[in-house]
Image: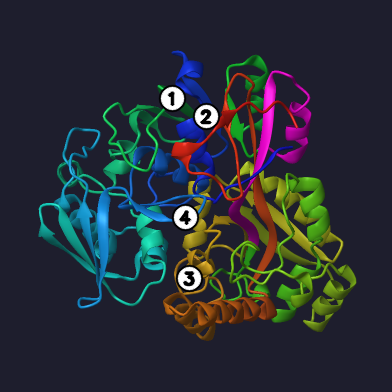
Amino acid sequence: MPQVYFSGIFHLLLFFIVIYPAITVAERPLQIAFSRETDFIDRLHTDSMESAALSLAVYDTLLYREPGSGRIEGLLANAWTWNSAHDAIDLTLRKGVHFHNGESLDADDVVYTIGLLIDPANNIHFRQREASFGFIDSVEKLDHHRVRIHLRQPEPLAEYVLSSRLVIWPQTYTENNGGHLIHRTEPVGTGPYRVLALEPGKQTVLSANQDYFKGPKSAATVTKLIIRTVPDVQTQIAELLQGSLDFTWGLPADHVRFLSGYSRLAVASAQSARITFLSLDAGGRSNSDLLGNLSVRRAVSHAIDRGSLTEHLVGGGAEPLYFQCHPAQYNCLSKPQESSREFDPVKAKSLLREAGYQDVISLELMCGSDELRKTGEALQWQMQQAGIHISLRTYTLPAWRKKFMAGESVMSLVSYGGDLFDAAGTLPVFFNFGPADYSRDAALARIVRRAVAETGQARRKQLFRDALKYISERAYTVPLYTNPVSFVFQNDITYATGGPPFPDVTRLRLRKIRGY
């Protein structure tokens, strides 16, 4: 199978923008399937892979990160400077940019969006507000096309956040329609695609924005995209074989291998920045105190055979995970011998006896998609061999997220995408007393906060590694595997590939991939 190495936020956008050259598109819309629904399509509210892909298609950020080199370029802002006198970043906005409803972009839109985002009274998701944008203290308008973002603290990754997460909403439209929640059902951005129709949980229809401005991000090359939520894998496969579905991604490895045998279909895989792990309620937020016992948490970790799970269930280039980070991140610990995570069911049973449990213990495991349910079923069988009985509960992604953030999870399968550059996009979300933190460890939160604020590269790396060792020793989570992404699509579609390093989407060379 051709291997491609994408950063987590780019791999779907690349399909949206360059999957068809103009001579291939003709006039038919591109039919895409997502396996799970998402409640928002902008990255201010949520950061699932589905949301990230749609957000990059519909919205724009102030800056743009070139996916191959990581170089930062201007997007909605075409110039920016670090203002040390004010502990701020000054940005000059690009002129002539219009939102999909015709409003012109200006400084008021940027000030309005950031003001909404950082004000707790507006109920923007805590995880997004604090973990990703907590370094922003305030924002002010300098003139019609210039803004100043004041920083609460030094933030080495500020430019990355401004180039990946901070999309801009139109002020007048958002205010006139009751606030930011209008973007759940009627999103309006400046991006290469505009939303024609959105039915939450069913489909999103996008059309090319013919007035998209010339910048580092490619204009749309597909006239119309119809993106449907199709959770059933067998339905996706049937539609691929019938030709009524053009493109899907994230199918289980055995189905991908099956589909690769059809000459009319093409298959490719990519390694994303996403990881899958078990969140354990060590802090006692749920109504169960079992996982408050370190020996029980360690028993869960030793009961899991990551190698078998990765090879036989996930496939597609997935790697076993031993620490709460992606191995490609420069500050990650990735060597198995550095962790205490080896598969050892005998040791798991011994640890349960040490904790005072002579017979089988029972734990509830929650997950937010049918895709993760398959992993949950494999874990059920593995942990049963070590005397741990698992009751598996599957929800839709929004329903699972609501329960998880409310502290109702004893144990959850979590699939989370950070960034291949740095672990700062992950650890503060799960270990800084936010709603996704089930460790509730003040000492760990202090290490994470110091790591995120540290500007020196060597010291920053060491602090993150200290945090990762701390998490591993206390078994606050059980890392499982990295998440590859398999793409299956009709063979008349032209697919862009390359990397690493991955080339810029505006300069991709297009070629066809046929099978493995």
Query: Label 3: few (<14), some or many (≥20) within 10 Å?
Result: many
Front residue of 248/453: it is 453
SS assignment at label 1: loop
Front residue of 73/238: it is 73
Can residue 360 be seen in the rendering of this structure?
Answer: yes
> Mark 1 or mark 3, which is nearer to you?
1
Residue behind mark 1 = 222
Range drawn in magenta: 251-277
Mark 1 or mark 4, earlier in chain: 1
Mark 2 or mark 3, earlier in chain: 2
> Mark 2 or mark 4, which is nearer to you?
2
Distance between the Cα atoms at labels 2 and 4?
A: 34 Å
Distance between the Cα atoms at labels 1 and 2?
A: 8 Å
SS assignment at label 3: helix
Residue behind mark 4 = 402
Can residue 230 be seen in the rendering of this structure?
Answer: no
Distance between the Cα atoms at labels 2 and 3?
A: 35 Å
Q: What's under tag 2, amino acid-wise? A: Ile
Mark 2 or mark 4, earlier in chain: 2
Q: Residue 428 carries which label?
A: 3
> Mark 2 or mark 3, which is nearer to you?
2
Mark 1 or mark 2, earlier in chain: 2
**Residue 440: in magenta span:** no
Distance between the Cα atoms at labels 1 and 3?
A: 37 Å
Q: What's under tag 4, amino acid-wise? A: Lys
Mark 1 or mark 3, earlier in chain: 1
Q: What's under tag 3, amino acid-wise? A: Pro
Q: Position of residue 448 (x, y in %)?
A: 50, 78
Quadrant for residue 56, please give it: top left
